[in-house]
Amino acid sequence: MFDAVEFEQEATAALREQLDGPAVIALSGGVDSTVAAVLAHKAAPTALTAVFVDTGYMRKDESARIRAMLEPLGMQLRIVDAAARFYAQLAGVTDPEVKRKRIGATFIEVFAAVAAEIDAKVLVQGTIAPDWIESGGGLRDTIKSHHNVGGLPADLGRLRLVEPLRDLYKDEVRTLARHLKLPNAERQPFPGPGLAIRVLGEATPKRTATVREAVAIVEEEFEAAAGRKEMELPWQYFAALLPVRTVGVHGDLRAYGEVIVVRAVQSLDGMTAAYSKIPHSVLERISIRITNSLRHDVNRVVFDVTNKPPGTIEWE
Ligand code: XMP
């Protein structure tokens, strides 16, 4: 049985030793990196600069949300707008593994620049056990190179990597987040490469804006329906943009538009998952909203009924 009190004590004691000078903390706004940051901040409050890189592949209003969550904790926070740099790196890229590796490498470059500025020696990351197991740690094949593991260049330069949550599973991180009273303890997971792996094919700024709006609609509608007790909130729920076009009608005219897939799963730790049985009334509202607000781009919405395995949770 996971003991959050004991883990916090042991992790902060270890971090106190490891954070022996200025450090940068990689923040995504998700529960993993926030917990890692809070533990590191407790262990060495003056040493730390929390860095949030806006890659251009973040969810709607994410920078403002991060600021509102972390500033009250007294954490030193730096928000870096690196969208143009990430878009340039992903121009013309369609292979999911190449996307992950480029994003991982660009992340490190951006961190390294901030770290050099504050003379940091250490980079803290919120890596958890499924990240490195699925990246081919242990005895398994590489299923996906999770960007905060497989995407790292072999040479981290002058930065030493510290990963306080390396041996934890998601449910344990959430228990810890509740114990630390973090506002995002129940927030669903969000992948490190962000919306780039929810745009199948090239993740251009325009296609990313499309999926960002669809993801926001799915989140809003599911959370509202769960609030009205029409359904239970799934473990993870989002939209992805497919690399196909289909024929539809827009007014009286033929439309040739893109396809959004809605994905919702139940899971304990992300290692296996069952697709969520969502009420049709909720799916219909989502479909209508997406095809209304994105009417110039999207004319079809589908729902994914695949478990993991054989599917994965994300489409890339
Ligand atoms: P999959 O798609 O592998 O997802 O079934 C399992 C869980 O991991 C998240 N995920 C990632 N997280 N970097 C991350 O930090 C990644 O590259 C990545 N790929 C998937 C996914 O959202 C799900 O919660």
Image (cartoon, rainbow, N blue to C red):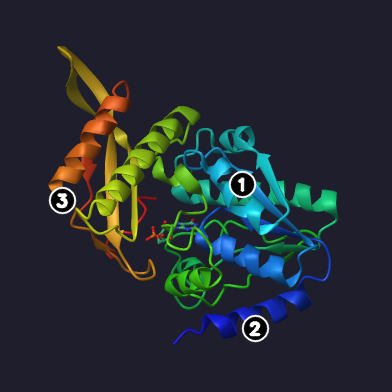
Cα distance between the residues tagged 2 and 1: 28 Å
SS of the residue under disc 1? helix
Q: Are marks 2 and 1 in contact (CB under 8 Å)?
A: no
Q: Is residue 244 above or below residue 187?
A: above
Mark 1 CB lies closer than 8 A to ligand 1:
no
For badge 3, the amino acid type reads: Pro
**Numbered disc total:** 3
In this view of the protein, can residue 137 be seen by the observer?
yes
- Mark 1 residue type: Arg
> In terms of sequence position, does the residue under pointer 2 or pointer 1 come before the other?
2
Q: To which residue does mark 1 refer? A: 67
Which labelled disc corresponds to residue 279? 3
In the image, which is nearer the foreground, mark 2 or mark 1?
1
Sequence-first tag of 3 and 1 = 1
Disc 3 packing (10 Å; few <14; some 14–19; many ≥20): few
Judge from the rendering whether residue 87 lies leftward or rightward of residue 289; answer left or right: right
Q: Position of residue 272 (x, y in %)?
A: 32, 69
Residue 127 is drawn in which quadrant?
Answer: bottom right
Which disc number belongs to residue 10?
Answer: 2
Label at residue 200 = none
Placement of the N terminus among the 4 image quadrants: bottom left
Tag 3 or tag 2, which sits nearer the N-term?
Answer: 2
- Point 15% across, 51% down: residue: 279
At 24% across and 22% down in the image, what residue appears? 256
Direction from residue 93 to residue 66 in the image, left or right? right
x, y percentage for residue 215?
Answer: 37, 41
Residue type beneath disc 2 = Glu
Residue drawn at the location 35% of the way across and 46% of the way down: 219
Q: Is residue 87 above or below residue 152?
A: above
Q: Nearer the viewer, residue 298 or 176?
A: 176
Between circles 3 and 1, the one closer to the viewer is 1
Q: Residues within 10 Å of mark 1 (few under 14, many from 20)?
A: some
